[in-house]
Image (cartoon, helix red, strand yellow):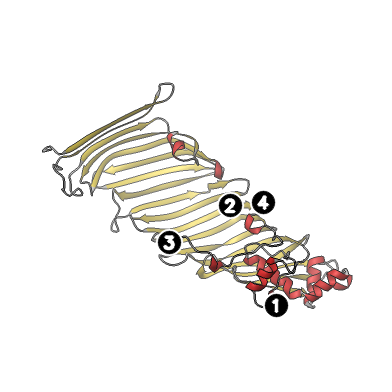
């Protein structure tokens, strides 16, 4: 009509006991919208919203990840400007917030958040949350509608914030992150220190389970990627490991240190630059603990999922002979070779590595297999690694479908798979 368009909204909720749960009151006016076909974006807007929630248990109905939520939310905002460029004046307060995330073993406490509309088109916000021994703070500002010239800006600062606390993963982070965002662009930069991380795999993941008689792995290029639009993300975030970072699982028990710069650019795979080092470690194989005296994962600016490898693991036999594995190449194409001190034939080195004694002290069947197929044993380790699990030297029976698939994939006779002793 001639007076434009206006509307009102009033919602009041109560609990089963009849006590107030929450309420929302709102009204708006578009005084110059008097007919169809008028441009909406430039329409002047006035309005207000007043909301109060004494309980935040509604969040548990929206997501199954949060339980035992609590807190109070108060919102009082007046709106002006236009539909395309609204202006907000008022505040939103979240106080006494708390929530548990069982999947991560987290108990989030002392959640506080304040957002303020300045009446000039901008919104400023601050907040904080405690988890474990640490706390995470957030601050930032944004127009109601972010643009390339005036994006949403978020700053994250934390110290030993508990990011995971399960039987398998305990993780504390100390981030210093800057985020900028518009409708079609996200930029992330900064550093995440990891003062403490303990990863202990209780079960072997499915990808690393021992190979069955007839398991066949698909070639990587045969797996089609799901179609989808990749977001325009630009990022440079450095991960820095502290002195309380350890990993236990898949036969490994290690301490780790180092740093890694993750680089994200639109249209390119995520790249990595840096180096992670095994400070001290053991690898359980063949019923023995192999000592890792050198272990590096090298990120040289290429794809982050295919770093270079430089590692050596060995065992010392009762007669002081040293036998082990040298691992080079990349994660997707590792090169595993045998070595020994003093130098000896591959078959002899393999005997010391696998059973801890020379060939002349092995059984006839064991010794014959080790003498005939030393190179193929090493190939087996590399092939298993490429499939996603660490070297185990436990392969398919000759003549099985899995052995045939291995021969088809690796044309060199030296890359044929055979069963060995674990």
**Cβ atoms under marks 4 and 3 closer than 8 Å:** no
Q: Write down the residue under mark 4.
A: 203
- Mark earlier in primary sequence (2, 3): 2
Neighbours of disc 2 within 10 Å: few (<14), some (14-19), many (20+): some
Q: Write down the residue under mark 2.
A: 196
Local SS, label 2: strand
Measure the alpha-carbon separation of dots 2 and 3: 24 Å
Residue 284 image offset from top left, x and y in percent: 73, 60
Q: Nearer the viewer, mark 4 or mark 3?
A: 4
- Mark earlier in primary sequence (1, 2): 2
- Mark earlier in primary sequence (1, 3): 3
- Mark earlier in primary sequence (4, 1): 4
Q: Within the image, what quadrant is residue 279 found in?
A: bottom right
Local SS, label 1: helix
Q: Within the image, what quadrant is residue 411 found in?
A: bottom right
**Cβ atoms under marks 4 and 1 closer than 8 Å:** no
**Cβ atoms under marks 2 and 3 closer than 8 Å:** no
């Amino acid at each position: 009509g001639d007076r434009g368009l206006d509307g009102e909204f009033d919602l009041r909720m109560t609990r089963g006991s009849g006590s107030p749960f929450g309420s929302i009151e709102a009204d708006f006016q578009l005084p110059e919208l008097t007919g169809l076909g008028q441009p909406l974006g430039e329409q002047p807007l006035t309005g207000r919203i007043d909301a109060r929630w004494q309980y935040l248990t509604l969040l548990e109905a929206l997501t199954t990840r949060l339980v035992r939520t609590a807190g109070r939310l108060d919102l009082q905002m007046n709106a002006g400007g236009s539909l395309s460029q609204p202006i907000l004046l008022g505040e939103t307060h979240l106080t006494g917030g708390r929530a548990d995330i069982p999947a991560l073993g987290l108990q989030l406490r002392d959640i506080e958040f304040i957002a303020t509309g300045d009446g000039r088109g901008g919104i400023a916000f601050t907040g904080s949350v405690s988890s474990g021994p640490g706390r995470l703070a957030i601050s930032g500002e944004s127009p109601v509608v972010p643009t390339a010239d005036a994006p949403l800006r978020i700053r994250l600062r934390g110290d030993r914030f508990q990011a995971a606390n399960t039987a398998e993963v305990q993780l504390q982070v100390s981030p210093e992150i800057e985020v900028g965002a518009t409708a079609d662009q996200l930029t992330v930069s900064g550093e995440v220190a990891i003062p403490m991380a303990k990863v202990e795999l209780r079960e072997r993941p499915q990808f690393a389970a021992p190979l069955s008689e007839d398991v066949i792995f698909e070639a990587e290029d045969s797996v089609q990627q799901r179609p989808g639009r990749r977001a325009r993300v630009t990022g440079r975030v450095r991960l820095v490991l502290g002195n309380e970072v350890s990993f236990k699982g898949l036969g490994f028990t290690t301490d780790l240190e180092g740093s890694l710069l993750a680089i994200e650019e639109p249209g390119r795979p995520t790249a990595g630059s840096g180096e992670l080092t095994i400070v001290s470690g053991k690898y359980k194989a063949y019923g023995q603990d192999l000592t890792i005296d050198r272990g590096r994962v090298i990120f040289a600016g290429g794809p982050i999922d295919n770093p270079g490898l430089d590692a050596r693991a060995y065992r010392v036999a009762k007669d002081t002979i040293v036998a082990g594995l040298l691992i080079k190449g990349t994660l997707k194409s590792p090169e595993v070779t045998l070595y020994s001190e003093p130098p000896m034939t591959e078959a002899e080195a393999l005997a010391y590595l696998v059973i801890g004694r020379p060939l002349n002290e092995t059984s006839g069947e064991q010794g014959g297999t080790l003498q005939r197929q030393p190179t193929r044993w090493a190939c087996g380790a590399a092939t298993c690694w490429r499939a996603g699990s660490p070297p185990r030297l436990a392969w398919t029976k000759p003549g099985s479908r899995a052995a045939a698939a291995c021969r088809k994939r690796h044309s060199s006779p030296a890359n044929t798979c055979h069963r060995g002793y674990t």
